[in-house]
Amino acid sequence: MILSFLEWLGSTSWSVALLESLYAWPLLESTHVLSLGLFVGTAVMNDLRLLGWTMRRVPVWEITGRLLPWTRLGFVVMVITGLLIFYSNPLRYYHNIFFRVKVGLLIVAGLNAFVFHRGVHRGVAEWGRAALPPRQARVAGAVSLVAWALIVVTGRMIAYNWFDCSIQPQADWVNWAAGCVTQP
Amino acid sequence: MLLWVFEWCDATALGAAVRNSLWLFPAIEAVHLLGLSLLGGALLVVDLRLLGVGLKRQTIAELAEQMRPWLLGALVVMGMTGLLLFLSEAIKCYYNDAFWMKITTLPVALLFSFTVRARVAGTGGLDASMRTRLVGAISIALWFIVAAAGRWIGFSG
């Protein structure tokens, strides 16, 4: 069912137009990549502060209150451009191993942020001035840092077709992980 | 005129090694992007502050000092990975307009960062002025051109 939906999605005229466009697709992709500087860049500085590696004299609530809105803005741009890129070629991304790993990592990063904000960040008024935040906050910062780094790397790798279903033969685990439909 | 320099770069063992490997170029590219992320953060924390938004309760000088090691680190990573990527396709770069855009804007951005911006940010207090706003805006604009032209190298030529 997912497959037929994605097949239909990829056959819509806007999707085809986007994929075949001379400038729209590169501009979209460039916006996605350049937003890394805003989104991952400011997120990294937030994480580094949680780890106590930079801006130790800046209260954590200042970072989460005044810098994180810029991170969110970057995130919105990332999601919109990312969804449009997916829309331009749904089936290819759906069967791309790196895309699948990236989506898994995005869920990890999202859950980590959720747990941080619902958990230890609620008491930021008490510990926000500490040069070295409490353990839970440091763990959240470390998980975020690693997750987003891996997301950047897997995101870049999506562009390569090494493990694409259309290139056979592939190892069994590749066909399994990519959900390829192969001849028996 | 400069073509022989690019041909020499293209022929280096390092360039050939990257070019002949299936995964080296993508791997170096990925690290280049991680460097871009860090560079963006280190620049924007200060540039946004120069513009009068972001971490407004900290002095500009304090933030600039805190971001300096990360900025330098990111530039080193970007420079090293960028050089390797360049060596692997130097001749292609010679005929690539986006490459020339990037390589001519980059020294301007670096020079601006370590002269005007370093001075203005290094002495900046709590208030943003017309001067700090202008410096922040120019910094963002210059680095935006470098990054956008850099991404475009892969699309053009």
Image: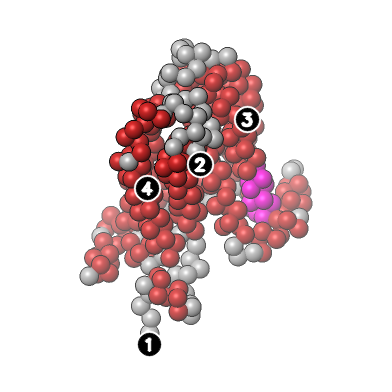
The residue that disc 1 covers is A184
How busy is the neighbourhood of tag 1: few (under 14 within 10 Å), some, or many (20 plus)? few
Callout 3: SS? helix
Q: Nearer the viewer, residue B11 or A154?
A: A154
Amino acid type, residue under disc 2 in the picture: Ser
The residue that disc 3 covers is B110
How busy is the neighbourhood of tag 4: few (under 14 within 10 Å), some, or many (20 plus)? some
Q: Chain of mark 2?
A: B
Task: Give how far across and how far down residue A32 sits, in percent.
Answer: 42, 45
The residue that disc 2 covers is B37
Magenta residues, as a range? Answer: B79-92
Could you tell me if the residues under marks 4 and 2 are in contact, i.e. CB atoms within 8 Å?
no
Amino acid type, residue under disc 3 in the picture: Leu
Q: How far is disc 3 from disc 2 in space, using C-alphas?
A: 17 Å
Task: Give how far across and how far down residue B103 sits, in percent.
Answer: 63, 38
Q: Is residue A10 left or right of residue A59?
A: left
